[in-house]
Each structure stands twice: as C-alpha cells, then as structure tokens.
C-alpha cells in the first residue's frame, strides 16, 4: 500500500474492546472480581472494577443534539460499529487510512488498572494479583484479535502491564514479547504515588 514509495505506520492505533472481554479471557477463579465493560451509553468505554467505574469522561455538558457524539464523527465509526468493532473492521480502518502496519492500543483498557493498590490504600484499592490477572486477560484477548486480523507482520499488539506488582509485570512483558507483541504500556498517572523513575520500576525498564 506504499504511496509514492513511502510506507505508512500507525504506532498508536486504538481498538474498541468488547464489553465482556475480561469475563471471557480472565481466570474464572476471580469470579465476581472480574471487570465488566459497561454498555449504558452510546459507544460506552467505561469499565467497572470492584466498586469503581473507570474512565476519564472529562467535563459534562448539556446535550444539544440529543446524543453525546458529533454527527461528523459517525463516518469514522459507522463501519466498525456495524461489525461490533471486530478484527475485520480494524483492518478496514487501516485500509481507509492507507496504513501498511499498526500497533494496537486499548480504549476501555486504558483505565482499567487506574486504581491505587490495595497494599497502598486498603480494600478499596486493586490487589496486585488481581491487577496482574486483568492485564493477562487483556493480553490474551489482544493476541487473538491480532491473529484474527490475519495480517502477519503488519499488525501488532501493545501489552498491558500492571505495575502494582513489578516482578509479575516483568514476567508478563516477557511472555508477550515471546509471542510477537512489539510494545507495552502502563496505566496513565502513577500507582501508589510512585513516579515511573522510582527505583521500584528498575527491573521493568531493564
């Protein structure tokens, strides 16, 4: 798909994960603690984790057109939405944008781990073992999603890492590098008020 001899790559292309991702891909032993994606509003990207509903929705305003999305945004999403945001719609988006390759990042998954750890703030926080299981479930789904795109060497996953337990994050990073992931990401902000340059994270950077 090179244009004038140039190849185009998107290093930060987002997917829209299914609401039941973690229910299908997480270790069932976590039972009622498994996150649940919400579908109460149009193109809902929120996810409930324990007692919290997570997503940075920004400032609220009165709806003047009866819906929260602008009409001119529909053309960008109509095909993907009709196909339930599946792998074929992701490939179609790449075709529409004339992309030769892409690295997939999350939408719901951006904030699913955006909680302080239970070790830091108590029961209302996220247990490190649960955080790791959430990341592992997401990464297993992403591996299947990339495979369903059927574009070997053109589409890649970015691994979700749970910094709540650094040693397990290191293991999860290695597991996904071995199966072809080319990037990883950490939840926006800080966990347990430790900046990313804290020595705690040195094993992960190494």
Image: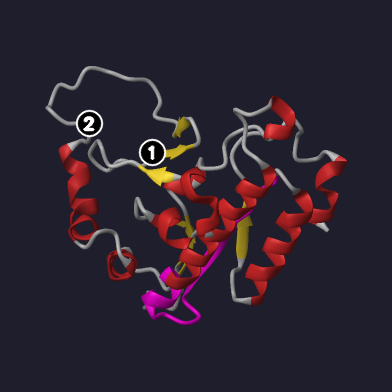
- Determine which residue is flagged by label 1: 46
Q: Is residue 37 left or right of residue 161?
A: left
- Determine which residue is flagged by label 2: 68
Q: Is residue 190 left or right of residue 8?
A: right
Measuring from the top left, give residue 5's x and y in whole percent.
44, 78
On whether residue 205 falls in the magenta region, the answer is no
Image point (30%, 65%), residue name: 86
Image point (50%, 70%), residue name: 143
> Is residue 15 visible in this depiction of the protein?
no
What range is drawn magenta here? Answer: 145-163
Q: Is residue 55 left or right of residue 73?
A: right
Say which quarter of the image contains residue 83.
bottom left
User: Does residue 155 sit above or below 108 in this rendering?
Assistant: below
Say which quarter of the image contains residue 206.
bottom right
Q: Earlier in the sequence, mark 1 or mark 2?
A: 1
Label 1 and label 2: CA atoms lie apart by 15 Å
Foreground residue among 7 and 36: 36
Measuring from the top left, give residue 177's x and y in whole percent.
66, 71
Quarter holding the N terminus is: bottom left
User: Does residue 121 sit above or below 18 in this rendering?
Assistant: above
């Amino acid at each position: 798909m090179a244009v004038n001899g140039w190849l185009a790559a998107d290093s930060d292309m987002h997917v829209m994960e299914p609401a039941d991702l973690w229910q299908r891909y997480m270790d069932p032993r976590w039972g009622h603690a498994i996150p649940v994606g919400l579908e109460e509003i149009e193109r809902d990207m929120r996810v409930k984790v324990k007692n919290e509903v997570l997503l940075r929705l920004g400032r609220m305003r009165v709806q003047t057109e009866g819906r929260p999305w602008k009409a001119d945004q529909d053309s960008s999403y109509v095909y993907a939405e009709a196909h339930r945001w599946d792998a074929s719609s992701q490939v179609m988006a790449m075709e529409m944008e004339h992309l030769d390759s892409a690295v997939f990042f999350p939408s719901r998954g951006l904030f699913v781990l955006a909680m302080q750890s239970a070790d830091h703030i108590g029961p209302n926080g996220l247990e490190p073992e649960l955080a790791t299981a959430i990341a592992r479930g997401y990464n297993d789904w992403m591996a299947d999603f990339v495979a369903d795109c059927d574009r070997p060497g053109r589409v890649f996953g970015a691994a979700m890492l749970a910094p709540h337990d650094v040693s397990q994050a290191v293991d999860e990073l290695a597991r996904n590098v071995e199966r072809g992931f080319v990037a990883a990401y950490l939840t926006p902000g800080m966990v347990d008020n430790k900046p990313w340059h804290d020595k705690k994270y040195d094993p992960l950077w190494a």
